[in-house]
Amino acid sequence: MSDFEFKNNVMHAEQVPLPALAEHYGTPLFVYAKATIERNWRLFTEHLPPPHRVCYAVKANSNLAVLQTLARLGAGFDVVSGGEIARVLKAGGKAERIVFSGVAKSDLEIEEALQAGIGQFNVESVTELEQISRIAVNKGVTAPVSLRVNPDVDAKTHPYIATGLERNKFGIAMADALPAYELAQRLPGLTIVGVDCHIGSQLTELQPFLDAMDRMLALISELAERNIFIKHLDMGGGLGVRYQGETPPPVGDYIQALLFKLEQYREQTGRELALYLEPGRAIVANAGILLTRVQSIKANKIKHFVMVDAGMNDLLRPSLYQAWHNIVNVENKLGVAVQGDIVGPVCETGDFLGQDRTLIAEAGDLLAVHGAGAYGFAMSSNYNSRPRPAEVLVSGEQHFVVRARETREDLWRTETLLP
Ligand code: LLP
């Protein structure tokens, strides 16, 4: 099921025709379907009731209205910066449902997080444990900590988004985990609440998650032998979505498989553990499209170039990860198909949204780039002095501009000329 479907040969976002949105707000434009976000969220929570917890990974799409939509459903949030904590609070999210990941937290971010009363720090190193302990003691508070342990499993995904291998910068090596927990127990101002890992993103197989979970459960047992008792296991995010032909496990199967392992653990040890997950992409990727207008089409001896008004500064994924996004004409019409690359206006050869595509399009047409709800606007930039697009959230027949298009003045708002 999709909330971006053709009705009378015109693609709609829920009940709103996309050409009307382009008319109203201009292009390029990010369009999100609220119903999809809510449906994706419920898929997770219906399989993972309390005391388990789902913490949406804010980095995937941090628009305030998106966060607000999830906060209203009682979401937890996984954040990686002080900026993301501030966004969650601004959007009405509850501090105690925040888990703070992030590889190099600053003193200021830790202070802000303690001030807000977040639920858990996912600690990345021994130095960070000492840092949090020092700041918590100074403030006269206790910081709830989980250690992010690197299980050294191959997530079988793009190397830029694999995080759980020993050679990656993330987390504490499994071999160092026990002494790190013992240190956490000795240090003042800390209370140990969990164990955490995140092995990568856009995973399309279950096995790496299960392997990682086995290693985490073995660690939790070893900790119990040392009288360190863990309340919950945070397995991070990473469940993949279908961009092209991928067949990631359905959310329900993924969660059932993890819960099954938890149940086995309970039977063997008599100890209860809550499961935390941090999905980002699986909540928002298919809830968003990037709407772009064809500027012109040119051909050389080899292929066509469909030049559109969105570029790598708006949607970086194709350039950075060779990611494939489905691109379609929002009007289902007859005509001559062009074969070639869909390219943006940025002065880089790597500025493409799609390569070797076949589609019916002519200048002036609108194209929808699917799967742009996750890591789309969130990774956009002003490269080539291009103002960033507006973001619109659709709900039924209503549409709301949830981020205005940037203006020329916005481009240099924080710059100054010399006296
Ligand atoms: N938790 C942690 C600690 C993470 O580092 C991430 C993503 C997530 C959760 C959420 O992962 P997800 O469920 O979205 O896979 N820009 C890349 C993805 C980078 C992901 C970084 N970490 C992309 O566009 O594919």
Image (cartoon, rainbow, N blue to C red):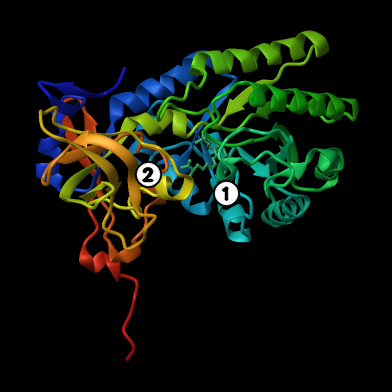
Foreground of the two, 76 or 6? 6
Amino acid tagged 1: Ala
x%, y% of residue 14? 21, 25
**In the drawing, does residue 403 fall left or right of residue 330?**
right
**In the drawing, does residue 296 fall left or right of residue 137?**
left
Pointer 2 residue? 376
The tag earlier along the polypeptide, 1 or 2, is 1
Q: Rate crowding at label 1 as few (under 14), some (14 to 19) or many (20 or more) other CA atoms within 10 Å.
A: many
| Viewport quadrant of the N terminus | top left
- 76 is higher (above) or lower (below) than 183: above
Q: In percent of the image, x 48 and y 45: which residue is there?
A: 321
The single residue placed furthest to the bottom in the displayed view is: 419
Secondary structure beneath disc 2?
Answer: loop
Secondary structure beneath disc 1?
Answer: helix
| Viewport quadrant of the C terminus | bottom left
- State yes or no: Cβ of the residue under disc 1 lies below 8 Å from any atom of ligand 1: no
Q: Quadrant of residue 340?
A: top left
Pointer 1 residue? 113
x%, y% of residue 11? 17, 28
x%, y% of residue 238? 55, 32
Amino acid tagged 2: Gly
**In the drawing, does residue 49 fall left or right of residue 396?**
right
- 407 is higher (above) or lower (below) than 19: below
Foreground of the two, 355 or 272? 355
Count of numbered tags:
2
Point out which mark residue 94 bears. none
